[in-house]
Image (cartoon, grey):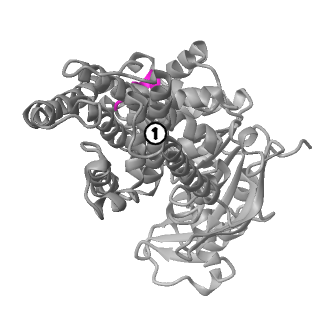
Amino acid sequence: MNLHGILAIYRFEMARFGRTIWTSLLTPVITTSLYFVVFGSAIGSRMGDLGSVPYGAFIVPGLMLLAIFSESIFNASLGIYMPKFTGTIYELLSAPLSPLETVLGYVGAAATKSMLIGIVIFATAHLFVDLPLAHPVLAFLYLLLVAVTFCLFGFVLGILANGFEQLQVIPLLVVTPLTFLGGAFYSIAILPEPWRTITLFNPVAYLINGFRWTFFGVSDVGVVASVSVTAVFLLLCLAAITTIFRTGWRLKS
Amino acid sequence: MTDPILRIAGVSKTYKSGTTALHSVDLDIDRGEIFALLGPNGAGKTTLISIVCGIVTPSTGTISVDGHDALTDYKAARSRIGLVPQELSTDQFETVLATVTFSRRLFGRSGHSAYIEELLRDLSLWDKRDTKIMGLSGGMKRRVLIAKALSHEPDILFLDEPTAGVDVALRRDMWKLVHKLRARGVTIILTTHYIEEAQEMADRVGVITGGKLLLVDRKDALMKKLGKREVDLKLAEPMAAVPDALSRWNLTIADDGRRLRYVFDAEAEETGIPALLTALSGAGIAFTDLETRKSSLEDIFVDLVREKK
C-alpha cells in the first residue's frame, strides 16, 4: 500500500480547499441562512408542523444533503478534472499508485470537505431553530455514506467530462431537481396521488428521508430502503470507477 | 554482461483513431548508460516513453524495468522511473518545494528534506522554493519538472525533448546534472532535437521514424559506419565542369564553380587525397584554400531518415 502516495493526494486536495476556505465555508452558511429566512421565517411561519416536527427543523436534513450533493460532486469532479485539464495527470498515471489508492486520496479529501460543510450547515441551523438529533452517531455515519457516494459519483463525472461546462450539467440538470422533488422541503405524505407514487421512484427521496430519520426518528419511507438505495448507488459508482481504471477509458489512450 | 535495466520487447501501439504510432519495437537499455532517441516529430518517441511510464497502454508487447513487468508488477517498475515530460504541465498554485515534495510522496517515499534541498540547489531552485509556480519563467518551470522527476531518486530518468525552448544557462545546468546523475549510476533516456547534444552526451543512439526503430548503435560506431568526410577546395579560377582527368574521384562543383568538393568515406583505408592533389596540379588546377569537414550525427540522421522513406 502506497500510504505516502495516498496522503500526498489527500494533502494536495485539502490544500486546494484551504486556499479557498472562507468562500468554501461561507457560501453554504449564507445559502443556508437564506433558505431559513425564506422557508423558515417567511413561509415556514404559515406552515403547520409536519407530523411532530416544526417546519423550520424539518427542512434541515434536506438542506444539508442539498449542499452535500453539490459540494461532493463539485469537489471530487474538479479534483480529478483539473490534472486532466492542466496535463499534470501524467504524473498521477506514471506513479506507483493503484486505482484504489488514487480513489482513496481524491475521494477521501472531497468527502472530508463535504463533511466539514455539512457540519457547518448543521451548526448554522442551530442559530435559527431548535434542532433535535435522535441518533447522532447514525446521522454522522449516514452523512458520511452519502458524502462518500456522491464524491465517488463526482470522481466518475470528473474523469468522463471533456470540459468545465460538462462538470455542471449533471448536478444542475439532474441532482438538484431530484433533490427539490425528493422532499427536501416537504413530506412526501402531503403529496396527492399520483405525485406521491412518482416520488417513490426518485432515489434522492430515500436519501433525504433516511437522513431525516436520524434526526427525528420519523420518515416517509423505511430506513432499510433508504440505506439500500444509498448502498446501491455507491456500488454503481464503484463499478463505474473499476471499469474506468481497468480499461483506461478517458484516462489513458 | 549484466541484465538490461529496461527491456522493451515487441511493443506496438495502435490508437483508437486507427493511427499506428509504434510498430513492434524491441530495445534494451543498459544500466547506467545515456541513450538518445532521435527521430522527427511524430516518429513515436513520446508514445514509446509514455508506454514505458504507464501513461499509454501498449497494444502488444512487454516492458520489463529492472526485472519487473511494467503492466503486472507496475508499482515496482514505476517507482524506479522518473519522467520529465515535453509539455510544461505544472500545478500553478503550488510552491516549488510543495510540488517537489508532493511528487516524492506520490512515488511512495517520505518527504526527505535533505535530498530535496540538494536537488533544488543542483537545479538552482532553492532560492525559489517558496515561490508559486505561476510566478516562474518557462525555464524555471522546466527545472521544476526535472526536480519532480528526480524527487523519488529514480534509477531511470526519461527526458522528453528536455532542451526544446530552453536557454543556454539551463541547458548547461541540465547537462551538468545529467553528468552528475550518470556518475551516481542513473540510466538516462532522452529524446532531443538538438542532435549535437546527443552526439556529445549519449553513449548509444537509436533512430526512430514512422514508429519503427531503424537502428540502435553506439554513437561512435554509428559515426564511423555512416560518417562521411569532405574536402572543400577553393579554386583560383572558377570551373564549369569536373575535368575527365578527375572523374575517378567523387567530385562535385559548388558555389558557381568556385569550389570543388570531394566526399569520401570517413573509415576508408585510402582517402585518395594525395592522389587527387597530384592529379589537380597535373591538370593545372590551382586552389587558394582547403577545408575538411566530418559529417555530424545530424547529417547521418537526415540521410538515414531520407533513405528509409
Q: Position of residue B79 (x, y in %)?
A: 69, 36
Q: Viewer-proximal residue, B245 or A126?
A: A126
Which chain hosts label 1? A
Q: Would residue B95 be counted in the magenta stretch? A: yes
Residue tagged 1: A146
Task: Please state, as top left, top right, bottom left or bottom right, where the C terminus of chain B lies in the image.
Answer: bottom right
Q: To which quarter of the image does residue B23 belong?
A: bottom right
Residue B238 left/right relative to B75: left
Which one is nearer the viewer's eye here, A1 or B209?
Answer: A1
- Residue type, label 1: Val
Q: Give the range drawn in magenta.
A: B93-99
Residue at the limit of the structure toward the top, as seen here:
B114
Residue at (39, 20) in percent of width and height: B128
Q: Which residue is drawn at 45% across and 17% down?
A: B126
Give the image location of residue B138, x and y in percent.
36, 38
In the rendering, at what x and y percent does residue A83 appear?
44, 44
Q: Compared to B255, does A209 lie above or below?
A: above
The answer to whether B123 appears left or right of A213 in the picture is right
Q: Does the magenta-highlighted stretch encompass residue B297?
A: no
